[in-house]
Amino acid sequence: FDEQVADTNEIDAYSTFDKFFIPPDYEGHNWILYIKDVDSKNKLMKFAINKKNEYSGQVTSYEINFIRKLLVNLWPCLDDDKTSLKNLSPYYIQLAICDFVNAEKKEEQKGIYVNNTKELNLLLNNLDIWSQRTYEGERVEMVFVIPKSSHINSQDNTENESKSETICINDVIKEDFMAPIANVGYSAILLDRDCNICKHISLDTDTTKLTNYPVPYKMNSFINYLNQRDEFKQCLVIALIENGDILLIRDNILQFARRRGQWHLFNNTVLDFLMGSDSISSMLYNAILDVSFAHTGGCIGVWEMDKNSLTDAQLDNLFKIFDINDIYDLDVKRQLESYCVQKKIKIKTDKKPWKRSALRKIIGTEMNISNSSFARKKVQELLGIDGAMLLDKNGNIIAVGAIVQIDGGSATGGRLAATQSLAKHGIAIKVSEDGKITGFCQKKPEEEVFNLG
C-alpha cells in the first residue's frame, strides 16, 4: 500500500475527524472521510472529505499527513474487493495515531521519538486500563516524556552495578507502585526511544513567566518547564489525567485525546479561519480547551462590535438577548441604559446586585482576555459559571454568567439554544460537560461550523 495516496486536490473542507470513528452506515451521522476511488491492482486509494458546510476552513497540512498514516493502517479494514470499510477497528486508528505522533515522515530517523511504535501503542493501551482503575480510592494520573533527542539513554541515571539493566515502562506500568508517581502538572517519567525508563522529572520553573500553550491548563506549567530546558524542547508528552482522558502533546500542542473510548484530533488553528490569526483567537482556543478538560461546560460568544463605538443596532441586539443587569462592562451598561431611556424602554430592577458587585471585584479592572495580564485560569473559571460569556471583537468582556434570551419553542437543550442565539451576531462556542466543543457562526447560526473532542 503506497503511503503517498492522499490526493490533496480532493481535500476541500475542514474536518476534525470527530465523526470519522463512526461506521459509515451508522444511522444519523455524516461520514466525513470516504473512499472515492480504489485501484486494487496497484494498491492505491483516493479519498475525499465531505464538505460539511460552506463556512468550513481548509484541512491543515498536519491533518493531511495524519490521513496518510490513517489510510496505511486502515488497509486491513477494507473488504475483500477493497472498495469499502468493513470494520473500522479502534486498533488501527490508534496505530495510525502512534505512527503520526512518532514522526510525520518515518524515513527521517532523526525526527522520530520511539524506535518501535508498537511500544507506544502498548503504553497507550496500558494507560487506558489505568483510566478505568483507582488507587486507594482516587483516580490515577500519569505523565511520560519522550524527547526527540537520541542522546537520552535509560542508563544515564543508573548506578554502575545496574547499568546493564534496562526496564521498559510497559513491563511495570500495571503495577500498583506506579500509581502515585508522575502526577499531572508536577512531575513526569522520562523515557528513551525504546520506552525504557530513564529518570523522574519534577516541576521546577518560574510560574510567573508562563507562555500559554494550546494544551489543557493543568499541563501548561509542565510544558513551560520542558521548554526551559534544551534537551526537552522537542518532545512527545503522554498524559493520563484525573478524569480518565489520555493526552498526546507534541511540539507543545495537544494533537490527540482519548475520551469516552474514542480518539479525537484537536486543531489549535480552528478559530483562525473564523476570527483571523491573532491573540484573541489563540486565547479563546485555550479557554475552550481548558473548559473542555475541566468538564465544567461553558458558553461563549464573540460579536463583531467594538465596546467603545456601539451602534443603535448593536445596542438593540444586546437588549434583546441579555438582561441589562448581566452586562458587566460599566461603559457598555451606561450606553445601553442611555439607549433604553432614548427609546423609552423600561429597565428591569436588578434582583441580584450582590452577584454583579462580587463578579466585578473578581474580574477586576482588566477586562480584556487577550492581554497577557489577564490570567488564563480566570478565563476558565469565569466560563464555568452558569450562563454565557460575551466578548467584543477586541476580546473585552461584556457579560459573564449571563442568561441568554432564546427563541420560544426551541427543541434543543438550553446551552445549545443559547449558543445558537449568540451566533446570530458573531461567533459562538458551546462546551458540553462531557468535553465536546461545538462552534457556530452568524450566517447560519443553527448549523455547526466545527466540533472538537
Image: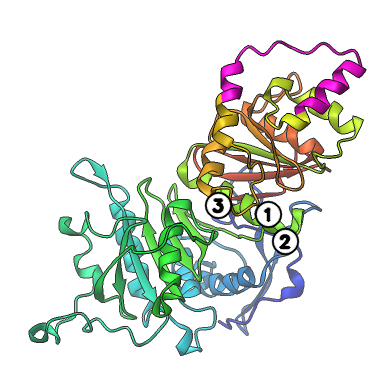
Quadrant housing residue 6? bottom right
Tag 3 residue: 22
User: Which mark is drawn over residue 277?
Assistant: 2
The image shows residue 50 at horizontal and vertical percentages of 72, 58
Question: Which sits in the foreground, 80 or 43?
Answer: 43
Q: How many marks?
A: 3
Q: Amino acid at mark 2?
A: Ser
SS at mark 2? Answer: loop
Quadrant housing residue 372? bottom right
Query: Which comes sooner in the sequence, label 3 or label 2?
Result: 3
The image shows residue 15 at horizontal and vertical percentages of 66, 58
Q: CA distance from mark 2 to mark 1?
A: 6 Å
Q: CA distance from mark 3 to mark 2?
A: 32 Å
Q: Is residue 301 magenta?
A: no
Q: Amino acid at mark 3?
A: Ile
Tag 1 residue: 281
Residue depicted at x 53% and y 75%: 72
Quadrant housing residue 127? bottom left
SS at mark 3? Answer: loop
User: Which mark is drawn over residue 437?
Assistant: none
Q: Which residues are magenta?
A: 333-357
Q: Amino acid at mark 1?
A: Ser
Mark 2 vs 1: CB contact within 8 A: yes
Q: Is residue 87 visible?
A: no
SS at mark 1? Answer: helix
**Outermost residue, left direction?**
161
How packed is label 1: few (under 14 Cα within 10 Å), some, or many (20 or more)? many
On screen, residue 250 above or below 283: below
How packed is label 3: few (under 14 Cα within 10 Å), some, or many (20 or more)? some
Residue depicted at x 18% and y 43%: 136
